[in-house]
Amino acid sequence: MVSDDRHPPARFNAARYCLGENARARPDKTALSMVGADDAVSRVTFGEADRAVRGIAAGLLRSGLRPGDRVMIRMGNEVDYVLVYFGALAAGLVALPSSPQLTPAEAAFLMDDSGAAAVAVGAGCAVDPADLGGRILLDAAAIAAMKAGPPVAGYADTAAGDQATLVYTSGTTSRPKGVLHGHRTIYAHRPMLAHWLGLSEADVMLHAGTMNWTYTLGVGITDPWSIGAAAVLYDGPRDPAVWPRLIARHRASVFAAVPSLYRQILKYGDPARFDLSSLRHGCTAGEALPPDLLDAWTRATGKPVYEALGMSEISTYASTGPTIPQRRGSPGKPQPGRRVAILPVDGPPEPLPAGGTGLLAVHRSEPGLMLGYWHRPAGEGQVMRGDWFAGGDLAHLDADGYLWFEGRNDDLMNAMGYRVSPNEVEAVLIEHPSVAEAGVAAVAVRADVAVICGFVVLEPGAEPDRDALLAWCGDRFAAYKRPREIRFLDALPRTANGKLQRGRLAAAEP
């Protein structure tokens, strides 16, 4: 296959694409600046990153791993996170990014479900070797030795469709499911580089997220590296006021975050105090961008914010941006080259005309689409409609091609930019000895902020103890999955057939 704006060559390795070519063309250019406490900065050039990645690739293969084996990464925002990620891809292995916030039980599920052969851990992610089940443990010392050891001569000769990354995301079941992507996915980001991020080699991308999130690992690292741009990440104390300072200090030209952080920056960060002349625009994804927030940011900084729509299975495929004018309340238009349609909720998968509301769908020919769900063929059957992938969003396209959301066709919640299954949270709540029944839904606390709320019917004689139930969930979930509120009800709203009506939970009377 001849490469174009979306389709890579038949033989394609994502690590070579992001690093190997830059190491030859610009070896001494800073690829990543990692900012820590007190603004201390660790920097790595493209040449240094390439050498370290090839050393890690060689070390992984020497340890007995074989192409296709999964390497789980449990680190915070550390340079080694990126290097191990690309080292796995360079060796023809499959990288499994994960959050350092995961509880031991959540991490164990991912290890077991993925069949991970190795686990790379960073600071604050202590792992008991007894819990590894014979898996290879890659701690800081082992990673340092691989980086310094003899490197592979070149990157693995992978096909564009070979397995590259496995990302776990909440679905409609009680357990997360693995989304498997090929090397081709990173190349397939090219339309969004031009039409959402507006990136060029001269840019400096500052991303406010953590690397376990595909939004950060993609937009914050792989996208700028794919064209030789520099990346800046932060691992210091959480403080909204730090971001304007980092933009000014590192002369960031593009800033990426979720909408709620833009609002916090305006409230606590006082961006007018800093020189933001280097900033061309902001980018946002993960949550809807409220029009009032867009207006407030533009008034305060004089800079636009471009929104994008995506998900773990397809990355971003619709946006506003330098080539797509903003339309208030809409996340934008399908990027040029993307095949996007609205399908009927029921019936044959024939695209609806403009104005028709139905399931938002992307054609299976899109190279950025997942290879499939890891060992979940039934899950794939739920989202594939003929030649179309439909993730559950209800929307319509107007006459000009802009997307407009109409809600969800399922119960998935959006909490701080993460998709969370209510089934997963309910399954934990119901295990508490005081709980007879439980329902979970997202409850709006502001126009642009929703929190996860547990609705509980107690066992006879049990006392309502909100703090105890929150602590119960806190011990069993990563922070972004935990309920922030508990409400006690006499009964959960159900249909005549006994099905829980989650849409009515927020309005239910105690």
Image (cartoon, grey):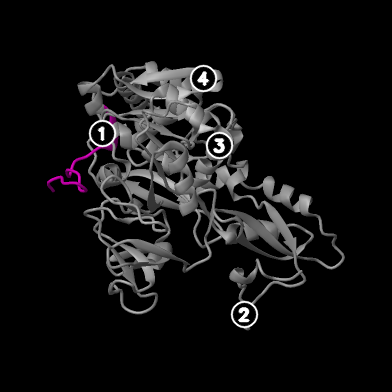
Q: Dividing the image into 4 quarters, which one contains the C terminus?
A: bottom right
Q: In this image, 362 relative to 174: left or right?
A: left
Measure how far apart labels 3 and 1 are at the Cα level: 32 Å
Q: In this image, 79 relative to 470: left or right?
A: left
Which of the two discs, 1 and 2, sits closer to the camera? 1
Residue matched to label 1: 200
Name which of mark 1 and mark 4 comes first in the sequence.
4
Is the Cβ of the residue at disc 1 closer than 8 Å to that at disc 2? no
Image vertical order of residue 314 relative to residue 104, above or below: below
95 inside magenta stretch = no
Q: Position of residue 114 (x, y in %)?
A: 46, 47
Measure how far apart labels 3 and 4 are at the Cα level: 22 Å
Badge 3 local density, few (<14 within 10 Å), some, or many (20+)?
A: many
| Image: magenta residue range | 1-19
Badge 4 local density, few (<14 within 10 Å), some, or many (20+)?
A: some
Residue matched to label 3: 100
Name which of mark 3 and mark 2 comes first in the sequence.
3
Which of the two discs, 2 and 4, sits closer to the camera? 4
Kind of residue sitting beneath label 3: Pro
Kind of residue sitting beneath label 4: Asp
Q: Nearer the viewer, residue 322 or 141?
A: 322
Measure how far apart labels 1 and 2 are at the Cα level: 54 Å
Q: Position of residue 154 (x, y in %)?
A: 23, 26
Residue matched to label 4: 39
Kind of residue sitting beneath label 1: Ser
Q: Quadrant of residue 373?
A: bottom left
Evaluate whether residue 485 shows in this view.
yes
Residue matched to label 2: 495
